[in-house]
Each structure stands twice: as C-alpha cells, then as structure tokens.
Image (spheres, grey):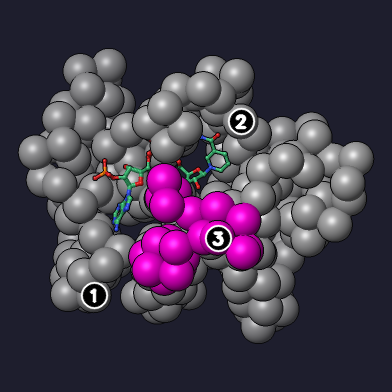
C-alpha cells in the first residue's frame, strides 16, 4: 500500500469485510477499479479475505479495524494517511445482532448495549476517525449499512412484512445509524462528502444463520450503488437497491 501506487485509484475502506455483505461490497468496489482496504478485526480472517480478492486479480489489502477497539481505528487512520494520503469511500458495514435481543418487554439490556456498542458507537467512532482522510478526497462518500428493521415508519405499521420482527436493540441501533446519516450529511453539505444509509435487504449471511432470501450480490447492490454515486447524487437519504425508503 504505497502512496505512489494508489494516487490514481479511488481508495475505499469497508468495515467487516472479511465475510458476508461487506466482503461482497469490497469485491464489487475492487471490480469497479477501486483500491479496497478490507477492514476486519481478526487478522487471519482479514488476510484470507484479502487474499481471496487478490487471487481474482483485484487490488485489495487487509487493515485491522475493530469497532470496539479505538486504538485500531486511530492506527488505521494513521496508516491510510501515511500510505495513501486520503480516503474516497467509507462503507460502514460491520454490525452484529444478538440472540438475546427481542421485544421491548423482554429484551436483554446487556445485549441491547452490546449491539449499540458495535452498530452505533462503533460506526460513529470509525466515521470520526476517517473524516479527516475523507475531507482530503475530491468526492468523499460514506455509506452506512442500515436496515429496514431500523425504519420507524415500518415499525409503526402493523401491515408491514416486518411487523412480527421486534428486536429492540438491533432495530434501535439502526434507527440511530439513520440519525447519524441525516445529521452528518447536513453537517458535511458544503464539503462534497455525501452520506447515505442503505438497506441490503434480507440476505443469507452468518448474521441470520443464512435464513436470508437474497444472494450476497443482491445484498451488496445498494451499498455499491451509493458508494459510487456521482456529484449529482443524493446525500442524507435512506435507500434500498430499488430506491428511497421511509425513515
Ligand atoms: P455477517 O456475515 O455476520 O458479517 C458481519 C461483519 O461485521 C463480519 O465481518 C464481522 O466480523 C464484522 N464485525 C462485527 N463486529 C465487529 C467489530 N466490533 N469490529 C469489526 N468488525 C466487526 O453479517 P452481514 O449480514 O454481512 O451484515 C453486514 C451488515 O449488513 C450489518 O451492518 C448488518 O446489520 C447489515 N444488514 C444485514 C442484513 C442481512 O439480511 N444479512 C439485512 C439488513 C442489514 P467477524 O467475522 O470478526 O465477526
């Protein structure tokens, strides 16, 4: 990852890129000509994920990014700053669910805190750590991987297909990510950095024990689309692959 090698390519960081939707987003960005840093908390898994993309002829490197360990975020930002000098795309993909999460009356409060630590506080921490590098981009893009389960509108609708899914910790953490999206987009309006939230759709991954009905390619589509929008594209929105979603 030498500065001179990558000044000509757009540079992306995808968190939680060792597997699942994040890995597929990383592959898609690399296939579209970006130099992709695969953020992962486990070095062995991260190196293997990078090697898998390199074996397909793609430019990708592992970088340690653990949302729960601030020192890794500072170190990652310093390394990217020293070796590349800027960041063009940040995909905040890493996230968790917890089997002890549930409806408001019964959910385990420690599980709710744990989910928030990763999905909201972790996403906020990565974003703050990378903002200085994104400001050096000619066209910075931040994509927050949210969920329809975080939509207040859908949660309030008894006819929603998700009406039966009450996971307070997970859903509230994604609603909080949506708020981060709206406020950060407004704060950065004058900078050219665009910030959007995306819903991958119900995708077969470890997160849902592969019960999801979409393929990884389908699940990665919205994140890819909004990571690559041009300067005329939206900022401060919530989107699925088929278009805007209700907050
Ligand atoms: P996944 O296969 O379980 O992948 C989650 C990724 O996040 C893994 O790489 C995991 O790393 C990483 N991660 C978790 N905690 C982390 C931490 N503290 N620091 C760094 N990385 C961490 O799940 P997925 O379905 O691809 O989920 C990706 C995103 O999509 C999540 O934000 C999820 O909420 C969202 N989403 C998924 C669906 C769906 O149907 N799958 C639907 C809507 C939204 P390890 O391998 O080390 O655990």
In the visual, does 234 lie left or right of 188?
Answer: right
Classify residue 84 as left or right of residue 160: left
Q: Which residue is mark 1?
A: 70
Is residue 234 in view from this perspective? no
Whole-angstrom CA distance, mark 2 to mark 3, is 24 Å
Q: Considering the numbered disc 1 on the image, is that residue within a helix, a strand or a loop?
A: helix
Q: Is mark 2 within 8 Å of ligand 1?
A: yes
Question: Residue 43, position in %: x, y?
Answer: 11, 45
Q: Which residue is mark 2?
A: 202
Say which mark, if any, is on residue 106: 3
Q: Nearer the viewer, mark 1 or mark 3?
A: 3
Q: Quadrant of residue 52?
A: top left
Judging depth in this view, the residue of 174 and 189 nearest the camera is: 174
Q: Earlier in the sequence, mark 2 or mark 3?
A: 3
Q: Residue 71, how many percent across, how many down?
A: 17, 75
Residue 75 is drawn in which quadrant?
Answer: bottom left
Image quadrant for the C terminus?
A: bottom right
Q: Is the residue marked by circle 1 packed among few (<14), some (14-19), or many (20+) residues within 10 Å?
A: some
Q: Secondary structure at mark 2?
A: loop
Magenta residues span 97-116
Secondary structure beneath disc 3?
Answer: loop
Residue 188 is labelled as none
Camera-nearest residue between 180 and 88: 180
- Residue 193, how many percent across, how many down? 60, 67
* Residue at x 65%, y 50% (from the top left corner): 166
Q: Separation of disc 1 and disc 3 at Cα?
A: 31 Å
Residue found at x 62% / y 56% = 103
């Amino acid at each position: 990852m030498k500065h001179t090698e990558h000044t000509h390519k757009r540079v992306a960081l995808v968190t939680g890129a060792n597997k699942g939707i994040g890995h597929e987003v990383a592959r898609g960005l690399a296939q579209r000509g970006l130099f992709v840093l695969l953020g992962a908390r486990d070095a062995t898994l991260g190196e293997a994920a990078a090697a898998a993309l390199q074996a397909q002829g793609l430019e990708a490197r592992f970088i340690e990014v653990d949302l729960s360990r601030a020192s890794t975020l500072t170190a990652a930002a310093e390394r990217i700053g020293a070796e590349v000098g800027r960041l063009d795309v940040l995909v905040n993909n890493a996230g968790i669910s917890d089997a002890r999460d549930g409806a408001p009356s019964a959910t385990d409060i420690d599980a709710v805190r744990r989910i928030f630590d990763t999905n909201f506080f972790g996403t906020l921490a990565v974003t703050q750590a990378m903002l200085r590098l994104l400001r050096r981009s000619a066209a910075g893009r931040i994509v927050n991987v949210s969920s329809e389960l975080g939509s207040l509108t859908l949660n309030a609708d008894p006819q929603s297909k998700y009406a039966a899914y009450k996971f307070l910790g997970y859903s509230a953490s994604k609603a909080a990510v949506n708020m981060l999206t709206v406020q950060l987009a407004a704060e950065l309006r004058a900078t050219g950095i665009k910030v959007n939230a995306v819903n991958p759709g119900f995708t077969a991954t470890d997160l849902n024990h592969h019960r999801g009905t979409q393929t990884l390619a389908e699940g990665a589509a919205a994140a890819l689309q909004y990571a690559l929008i041009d300067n005329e594209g939206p900022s401060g929105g919530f989107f699925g692959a088929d278009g805007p979603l209700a907050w």
